[in-house]
Image: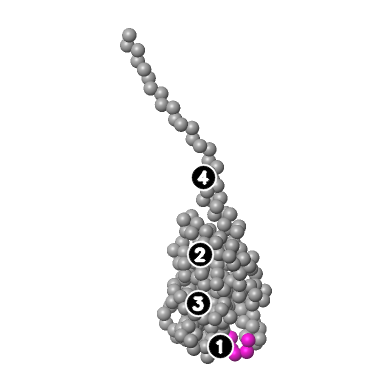
């Protein structure tokens, strides 16, 4: 996922067919049909990969998948800019492109090649800054992408550097918090506990000082938001034990006795 907003790529043979199917689903207009075909294409990609001896990606290259992701991300940026500027004429496209990115991310995670996606998403500061200017009903799907990344990191499916994990939280945690209530109410089949566990585990991979900052801020938010805030109490407790319990449980060292020899010269 780079700066180039051209979603297409030059491919041939079986890959050309797969890329075309992928693109048709991403651009489809009928939501019910899109849901059905996403399941079908995902199954085809899975079987295609397995038939090639388990080779990652089968005959669909990583570059082709990321080219499709990049096209969706560019469209998402464009619609965010328009909506944040007051143009709501095509605001529904925000949810469409976010849903596309979520689907593509699932494919990348399954193929164990989602690291570049996370790094790119973590750098979308401009998108995150515009987040609050777009109505929540249209933007909460964007936070589903963030939630999927939290789950991936928390379960060890996406392995990136400490800096990348920290940047992901720095960029997207606040928008995620703001949308959590909407996700909980609007997303059918949302596994709240899986997301909460993923978020907590992601935070727990960071240095203790960073964990403290995030968990204390969460504590305050949770007390004022309740059900509209993810419950990461278990992660909070783990951080507390790591940071303070062991330290305070260590027995106090007795003062050392200093023995000085006295020579009697008498």
Do callouts 3 and 2 mark residues in contact (Cβ within 8 Å)?
no
Predominant secondary structure, magenta span = helix
Of mark 3 and mark 1, the one earlier in the sequence is 1
**Point 54% across, 77% down: residue:** 142
Do callouts 3 and 1 mark residues in contact (Cβ within 8 Å)?
no
In the image as oriented, which residue stretches furthest toward the left?
Answer: 265
* Image spot of residue 264 (x, y percent): 35, 12
Q: Which residue is mark 1?
A: 27
Do callouts 1 and 4 mark residues in contact (Cβ within 8 Å)?
no
Front tag of 4 and 3: 3
Q: Residues within 10 Å of mark 2 (few under 14, many from 20)?
A: some
Viewer-side residue, 257 vs 31: 257
**Point 57% across, 54% down: residue:** 238
Viewer-side residue, 203 vs 118: 203
Q: Which residue is mark 3?
A: 132
Q: Which residue is mark 4?
A: 247
Of mark 4 and mark 3, the one earlier in the sequence is 3
Q: Which residue is mark 2?
A: 159
> How far separated are the C-alphas under marks 4 and 3?
41 Å
Q: Is residue 193 above or below residue 98?
A: above
* Among the 4 quarters of the image, the one containing residue 38: bottom right
Of mark 1 and mark 2, the one earlier in the sequence is 1
> How far separated are the C-alphas under marks 1 and 4?
56 Å
Front tag of 1 and 4: 4
Q: Residues within 10 Å of mark 3 (few under 14, many from 20)?
A: some
* Image spot of residue 205 (x, y percent): 51, 59
> How far separated are the C-alphas under marks 1 and 2?
30 Å
In the rendered image, the quadrant that contains the C terminus is top left
> How far separated are the C-alphas under marks 3 and 1?
26 Å
The magenta region covers: 24-31
């Amino acid at each position: 996922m780079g700066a180039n907003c051209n979603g297409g790529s030059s491919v041939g043979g079986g890959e050309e067919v797969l890329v075309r199917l992928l693109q048709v689903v991403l651009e489809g207009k009928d939501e019910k049909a899109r849901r059905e075909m996403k399941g079908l294409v995902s199954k085809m990609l899975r079987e295609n990969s397995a038939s090639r001896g388990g080779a990652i990606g089968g005959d669909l290259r990583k570059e082709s998948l990321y080219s499709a992701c990049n096209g969706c991300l560019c469209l998402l940026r464009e619609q965010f800019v328009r909506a944040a500027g007051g143009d709501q004429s095509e605001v529904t496209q925000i949810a469409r492109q976010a849903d596309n990115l979520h689907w593509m991310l699932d494919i990348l995670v399954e193929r164990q090649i989602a690291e570049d996606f996370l790094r790119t998403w973590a750098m979308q500061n401009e998108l995150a800054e515009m987040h609050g200017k777009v109505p929540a009903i249209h933007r909460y799907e964007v936070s589903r992408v963030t939630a999927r990344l939290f789950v991936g990191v928390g379960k060890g499916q996406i392995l990136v550097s400490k800096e990348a994990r920290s940047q992901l939280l720095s960029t997207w945690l606040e928008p995620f918090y703001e949308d959590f209530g909407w996700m909980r109410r609007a997303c059918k089949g949302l596994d709240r506990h899986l997301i909460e566990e993923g978020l907590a585990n992601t935070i727990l991979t960071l240095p203790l000082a960073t964990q403290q900052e995030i968990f204390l801020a969460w504590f305050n938010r949770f007390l004022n938001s309740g059900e509209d805030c993810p419950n990461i109490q278990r992660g909070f407790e783990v951080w507390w034990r790591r940071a303070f319990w062991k330290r305070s449980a260590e027995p106090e060292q007795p003062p050392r006795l200093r023995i000085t020899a006295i020579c009697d010269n008498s």
